[in-house]
Amino acid sequence: MALAKLGVVVLDCPDPRALAGFYAEVLGGTVEGEGGWVDLKVSDGQSLAFQAAPGHVPPTWPAPDDSQQFHLDLTVEDLDAAEQGVLALGAKPLDAEDRSRSYRVYADPAGHPFCLCAC
């Protein structure tokens, strides 16, 4: 028996509304809230939350001496089309050169790593 159930994944960032908007464009859904805490309600019932962190320092990826802290795996049907979309929204490639793999790694506008993964 589980002791708890996952409520929401929260990403620290300098501008919660802006980062929620980025992920709303990538995942769909509705951005709710203002100020220091903003929620993204995705249509499949999942949510992401974004919390203001004035001293936010993005993780370094890859860095053998530092942790990436966490990353999101986002499942897509067309890697090339999804890549063009996230780059147009402000994502930066971290490790997207190897076209033989079924995933590519990017940083969101606040520097959090995420992967686009072919389904």
Image (cartoon, rainbow, N blue to C red):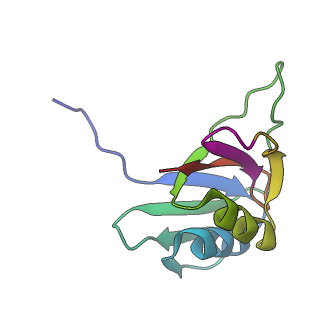
Q: Position of residue 35 (x, y in %)?
A: 66, 75
Dividing the picture into quadrants, the one containing residue 105 is top right
Task: Name the foreground residue: 99 vs 111.
Answer: 99
The extreme front residue here reads 100
Residue at left offset 56%, top offset 47%: 73
**Can the viewer see residue 112 in this picture?**
no
Q: Position of residue 3 (x, y in %)?
A: 24, 33
Q: Is residue 97 above or below residue 26?
A: above
Q: Where the N terminus falls, by quadrant? A: top left
Q: Position of residue 32 (x, y in %)?
A: 52, 79
Dividing the picture into quadrants, the one containing residue 61 is top right
Task: Specify start and end residues of the magenta stretch as a single range.
Answer: 99-107
User: Left of 46 or right of it: where is 37?
Assistant: right
- Residue 105 within the magenta-colored segment of the rendering: yes
The extreme left residue here reads 1
Q: Is residue 6 above or below residue 33?
A: above
Q: Position of residue 48 (x, y in %)?
A: 51, 61
Residue at left offset 36%, top offset 46%: 6
- Residue 117 within the magenta-colored segment of the rendering: no
Task: Name the foreground residue: 119 vs 91.
Answer: 119
The extreme top residue here reads 65
